[in-house]
Every structure is written in structure tokens, then in C-alpha cells.
Image (cartoon, rainbow, N blue to C red):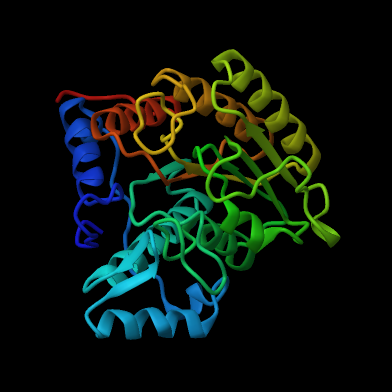
Amino acid sequence: MIEHRVPGGHPERPERLTAILRHLERSGYLNTCPSGRVREATNEELLRVHESGYIRELERLEARGGGSVDPDTWVFPHSMVAARLAAGAAIEAVSDVMSGRDRRALCLIRPPGHHALRGDGMGFCIFANVSLAAAEALERFGLNRVLIVDFDVHHGNGTQALYYDSERVGFLSIHRFPFYPGTGAKGETGTGAGLGHTLNIPLAHGTRRSEYHAAFRAGLHSLADRIKPELVLVSAGFDAHAEDPVGDLGLETEDFETITREIVEVAEAHAQGRIVSVLEGGYNLPILAACVATHLHALGAEPGPA
């Protein structure tokens, strides 16, 4: 996944993962957290949420030497392997958790995925990683209810669009608004059988941290109590941090511990504690690494000797 290269100056760069891994190694987490299985997602798996024509176009773009999917999203040689590995890691994490191998999993992957649509990539995202994880839970393991919680500073428009009419997937997004990608208003609550299963919590820049946590807790528990998920998936973006150069919703590193503990509480109440968390955004490298460690600890991991 580090081989997915982007133009110079692009914030979603390979160094994001290397910074996280170095920090986790120094802090002792890599000694205590077993590595999960990573493989490329198959076409059959990708087709659960993506159009075949979109996959073929990405392959053609890479074969021609690469280019842009949209102004922010690029495909170069090795990008398709990286994107398939990212999606495959999320899918395998669901398998590990649902089979009982692990109770919780954190997928440190790139490129991110929550903006990817059925037939298009955008916002640094190629494949819809967390949506593919949900499809694995629903189709392979036959779950009736899955909850996706997205705390990236940007609205998870792709995830929302893919499951907007589904009664089997609940989606909560807490995000800066108005902001990229322009979706995620409070009135977007689902349609058809999925009406009421989407909960958007749009917050203005400058919202107090205490107000953020109050809104998140109330919304999360309300939605979870209503749909009673059997698995909780997380789009874990850390670009709401006050020092993030792309997002900034005024949060501090310790806030992500509070957010994560709320998610754990919901998972314990409804889903036998089962959580699969998938990395999304976060672009200040030292801050991102520290936030990931905080998130990992709140999920239940303990550091060992560095």
C-alpha cells in the first residue's frame, strides 16, 4: 500500500503509513498486536459495491501509465494493487472478527475509501473499503444489521450513497459542514427501506469540543439502540484534529480516545464487542500517528516493550 504513489505535495502520501508504523513500533504496540491477513480483494468482492466498468477503467488508466480519476485522486503503476490490498485487508478483518480469531481489528491501509462511489473515485479514494467490509459481513456472514461510524472530518458521501436505501446498514457521520464534499446535511436520513438509518451530525468550524462529544454520544447511542447492530465498522479519520492541515474541527489527540470509547460501549451493548476500524484521513504525520495509537489503545490494545 506504500507503493501507491501520488504527485508531489499531495497530502495522502505513503509517508502516512510509515509514520504510523514507526510510532506504533516505538510505543510498543507492534509487539502486542498480532498482524492480520492482507490480500488483494477479488473482482467478485469489488463488484459487491462497484460497477465493473469502473474497475476496468481504473485498470486501463494504470496500464497507460496512470493519471487522475478526479483532481484529487490519482492512479499510477502499483496503485491498483495497493487499492485492492486496502479493500482486501478490510474484508479479511471482518472475516477474522466474525470467525472469532479476533474481537477487534484496526486496518492501517491506504488509499482511503469513504468518498468512493459505485462507479467513480474521488477525494483520494479508489475503492470503498468500509462499504466492502460491510458487504462481507452481510453477504458472507449473513448479518442482519451493521453499523458504520465515520468520524473523519469530511462527510463519508460514498458510504452513505452505497447504503442509503438499505435497512441492514446504519450509517453515522459526524463531520465539518459546510465542507468538502458538500454532502452530509442533517436532513439526509436515508430513503425507502433505509429511511432513518442514516444519521448525519454536521458541525460548523469552531464548534466546541464539549459540544462535539455531546452530539456524537447522543446520536451514536440513539442510532445504535434503534438498529441494534451485530457488528460495528469504523471509518477512522483523524483530520478533525486542530493541527491537521486539511480538516481541522478543533479536536485534540485525547478526543479520539473519548470517541473510540463511545464506539466500544455501543459495540459491547449490541455487537458482542465486535469492531473493525478502517483508516481514512489524517495528514499531519506526527499527529496522525499519535491519534492512531490513542485509537488503538481505546479499542483495547496494550503496548508492550518497545
Residue 23: x and y, percent?
20, 31
Query: What residue is rendered at 33% in x and 24% in y?
Result: 302
Residue 140: x and y, percent?
58, 67
300 left or right of 68 in image:
right
Q: How many marks?
A: 0
Q: Is residue 234 visible?
A: yes
157 left or right of 164 in image:
left
Residue 264: x and y, percent?
56, 30
Residue 83 sits above or below residue 61 on the image:
above
Query: What residue is rendered at 39% in x and 57% in y?
Result: 124
Residue 35 sits above or below residue 292 on the image:
below
Query: What residue is rendered at 63% in x and 17% in y?
Result: 211
221 left or right of 300 in image:
right
Location of residue 71 by image quarter:
bottom left
Quadrant assignment for the C terminus: top left
Location of residue 21 by image quarter:
top left
Query: What residue is rendered at 38% in x and 78% in y?
Result: 58
Q: Is residue 142 visible?
A: no
Quadrant assignment for the N terminus: bottom left
Q: Nearer the viewer, residue 56 or 193?
A: 56
Q: Nearer the viewer, residue 268 or 132?
A: 132
260 left or right of 244 in image:
right
Residue 286: x and y, percent?
24, 29
Residue 120 sits above or below residue 228 on the image:
below
Residue 223 sits above or below residue 251 on the image:
below
